[in-house]
Amino acid sequence: MVPRYSLNRMNLSDLVPLNPDFGASLINAARSEAFAEILFNAANTVSGVEEVFGYVAHKDGRPDVIVAHSTLDGASERVRQYVKRFFRHDPAVSASRNEKFGFSRRIRINEIIPYDYRRLCFEEPRFQEKLSFGWRLPDGLAMLSFYKRGEIDEHAALNLTRIADVSLAALRHAQKPPAGAVFIETLEARLRHTHPELTMRENQVCARTVAGWTAEKIAKDLGVKASSVLTYRQRAYRRMNIAAANALLPELLH
């Protein structure tokens, strides 16, 4: 558990607010590819963490990965296996079920029970612990975790708490579809149910493609490059073993 701080026990100079320029940059980048790098650089600067991972988990499927950034090899495989196999074994996720609102948990390597989870996500990258922050949502859970090879001291934990406050709001903002896009939201929900193997971006791109959007329009809406839209689309098609979006119509438009 992250230490609880009391105004009676600490120097008020420790309560310096989070840099507003950094907070604004996170919110502005919430739906763009720059979000992960901005968040990671800030967290690494204040605490020396080597990996950041955040997602929104819906009640009806696997987590939608929203941010994943690391200085270490193998991060993509760690994310893939966590989403596919290890999510429900995470002690932070288990602890969140007893919380009504926000929570924070310090998870050390010896708390990870399944051996393959501990080996792949902690022993191989040599992480000793992670600091996880979460918030219960009406439809699931938002989680943000910071991984480090060494111990995260109390001062660093306090700084990461401030960063997490803004970042969780930005993650939630990134997860929501634009106002008025009820049809797109419905398609995304159905895709999460029928094809949980898709990443968040692949889901978003496929839903908008089914709705008839061009790659340029999708890119503008999601805050990414048009070339990235094409890449996400190709990856999604390979995962689903289809050649075009119209193959999805029978299962989504009913």
Image: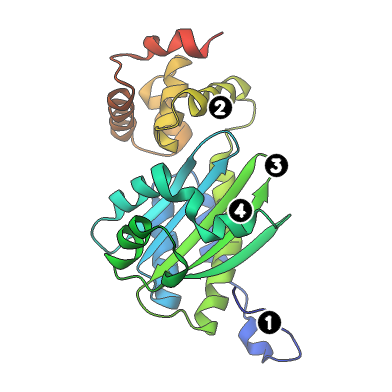
Amino acid at circle 4: Ala
Q: Earlier in the sequence, mark 1 or mark 3?
A: 1
Quarter of the image for residue 116 reads: bottom left
Q: CA distance from mark 4 to mark 2?
A: 21 Å
Kind of element beneath mark 3? loop
The residue carrying mark 1 is 5
Is any atom of residue 152 visible in this view?
A: yes
Q: Tell me if label 1 and label 3 are in contact, CB under 8 Å.
A: no
User: Observer-nearest residue: 131 or 119?
Assistant: 119
Label at residue 189: 2
Quarter of the image for residue 20 reads: bottom right
The residue carrying mark 4 is 169
Amino acid at circle 1: Tyr
Amino acid at circle 2: Ala
Amino acid at circle 3: Pro
User: Observer-nearest residue: 83 or 190?
Assistant: 83
Kind of element beneath mark 2? helix
Q: Earlier in the sequence, mark 1 or mark 4?
A: 1
User: Observer-nearest residue: 90 or 24?
Assistant: 90
Q: Tell me if label 2 and label 3 are in contact, CB under 8 Å.
A: no
The residue carrying mark 3 is 138
